[in-house]
Amino acid sequence: MTDMTDPSGAGQVLKVSDLSKSFGALQASKNISLDLRAGEIHALIGPNGAGKSTLIKQISGELRPDSGSVSLLGRPVDDLDRVARARMGLGRTFQISALAMEFTVLQNAVLGALGARGGVFRFLGNVMRNKALVAQAEHALERVGLLSDAKRRTADLSHGQRRQLEVAVALTLQPKLFLMDEPMAGLGAGGSQALTGFLDTLRHEAPILLVEHDMDAVFALADRISVLVYGEVIATGTTEEIRNNAEVQRAYLGEEEPV
Amino acid sequence: MNREKLLNAAVILLLLAIPLWAHMAEEPFLITLATKVAILALAGVGLNIALGIGGLVSLGHAAFFGIGGYAMGILAAHAQNYEPLAEWPMLIEGTNQMPVIWLVAVVASALAALVIGALSLRTSGVYFIMITLAFGQMLYYFAISWTAYGGEDGLSIWVRNEFPGLNTLVPLEFFLICYVILCAALWFAARLARAPFGLALSAARQCEARVETVGITPYQLRLTAFVISGAITGLAGALFADLNRFVSPTMLSWHTSGEIMIFVIIGGVGRLFGPVIGAALFILLEHLLGGISDYWQIYLGGLLLIIVLYARGGVIGAISGREVAHD
């Protein structure tokens, strides 16, 4: 529907236009524009402090931009808080795990299923005996390879497993797009490879805006890459274009020798 | 059955057995003490829903306890003086029927919790504590100045209110009323904790961002929990007033809020039977140590310090260890 009414935004699931945000004298986002199209993984890279997380927070609705606009699925969402944006189909994972640590792994996933299916204001039935919710939660855990850990306490998980759980909870929401803030951080080489393989297939369900420091993963996965430096997008393009972009090499890649 | 469940079963049976024995041994004072434990535990069960599951540190629950108390006092005072509460636009008479009083107490305290919660829950942390405290104190001073209902002196009710089919003047029968209500509240609180609502409320306490990210608004969860919590504590207030046949602004003071919170903390925050064990220990200490020294609360303070510093799960946590995540 979006595609037909808005020809310029064909297939655009997310559109960020001219977003700016300052904290005092620090300008964390400078006129940022980017989009996320159906079926793609769009990676957002940049050195620490470049404003990646600030941008993610403005997209998810945690932070209000000073100016500019965000559209989800062709609808401007500037007036919507993050709960409303989540309900529209925005699935998010956090850089620092945001999970209910006292819960079991399964309970966290069931919470996601509960959010997706609604019916939070039920006061009597045992939520963990609700077959539909548990099935949906277990399915998501199975997809990220955490089903065998379902009964463990979330606080007892490794950092990598918490990342996997974050992805699983996001999956229970069956989102229309994913915002993933460093999902690979803390994963070992094996885990990182497994998640790379998984995200590769996931893009066909819902496109992913991926903030990631693991350059192997970024260059293996991304259809397009945007490079953020000092709050500014200095380049957007295919992996080839970014690799060969002189400005990017100077500003960023040169320091880290990613490939 | 794990240790916590065994402990819970032992406590709830003991709370029933002692008054039954006291009835046969003709020790009515002991029955009164047990009744007090049941009622204060009920107030704690109410607070525990907000504090234990929801993490809402309310220092204003005396407001609901007191509103429940005044609901009883006002209705019963009008009944005993044969003065209607209102003649216009319709005739409203006082009543000495407990079920009606309870209903009024629950509705009034739920409404108060809705208003207080709606405003307080816009803040969090220490601000939430201070605002709930401020609302509680507001009602306290209002009651002091409300001379129509006794002002500072409070309201005395000559005869305990009635319950159909029972003689509430017999201590054991009044105890049983309170005990059954406590059991019902415990049953409800246990179900609530495991229900979809309890899961989401608990998650909102542990990680607000998580709840929002799955599309649930924490404010609505917390406000609902606060209203349920206030209503249960309000019901306890009505029973407490009936136990003493007296209601005064003291029920609304922040000391009362603190005491209810102490029951929950001593027993174990978020533990189903925490308030029961806490209230029982409180009453026990009050009467064992109160006989020795007027300053018995110094020992209570010591106990509280030890629990806060070394036994975060309260008495239940110390006995049965960490809470088992329910499956």
Image (tube, coloured by chain):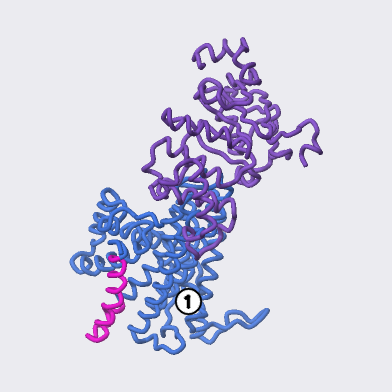
Chain colours: A purple, B blue
- Dividing the image into 4 quarters, which one contains the N terminus of chain B? bottom left
The correct choice, above or below, for B207 with respect to A30 in the image is below
Front residue of A192/A111: it is A192
The answer, for residue A49, to whether it is visible in the render is: yes
Please tell me which residue is depicted at 77% across the width and 37% down the height of the picture: A3
Could you tell whether B316 is left or right of A1 in the image?
left
Tell me residue B209's x, y (percent). Answer: 52, 43
SS type, badge 1: helix
The correct choice, above or below, for B302 with respect to A201 in the image is below
Front residue of A181/B272: it is A181
Tell me residue A192's x, y (percent). Answer: 46, 30
Q: Amino acid at mark 1?
A: Met
Could you tell whether A34 is left or right of A127 in the image?
right
Tell me residue A134's x, y (percent). Answer: 50, 55
What span is colored magenta in the figure? B6-32
Front residue of B148/B193: it is B193
Could you tell whether B163 is left or right of A198 in the image?
left
Report the residue that reaches farthest toward the left.
Answer: B292
**Label 1: how many Cα within 10 Å (few below 14, some 14–19, many 20+):** many
Please tell me which residue is depicted at 49% across the width and 40% down the height of the picture: A144
The answer, for residue B137, to whether it is visible in the render is: no
The correct choice, above or below, for B176 with respect to A235 in the image is below
Please tell me which residue is depicted at 50% across the width and 24% down the height of the picture: A213
- Dividing the image into 4 quarters, which one contains the C terminus of chain B? bottom left
Magenta stretch: helix, strand or loop mostly = helix
Could you tell whether A21 is left or right of B170 in the image?
right
Please tell me which residue is depicted at 67% across the width and 27% down the height of the picture: A34
Chain letter of disc 1 in the image = B
Q: Can residue B280 be found in the magenta stretch?
A: no
The residue indicated by pointer 1 is B72
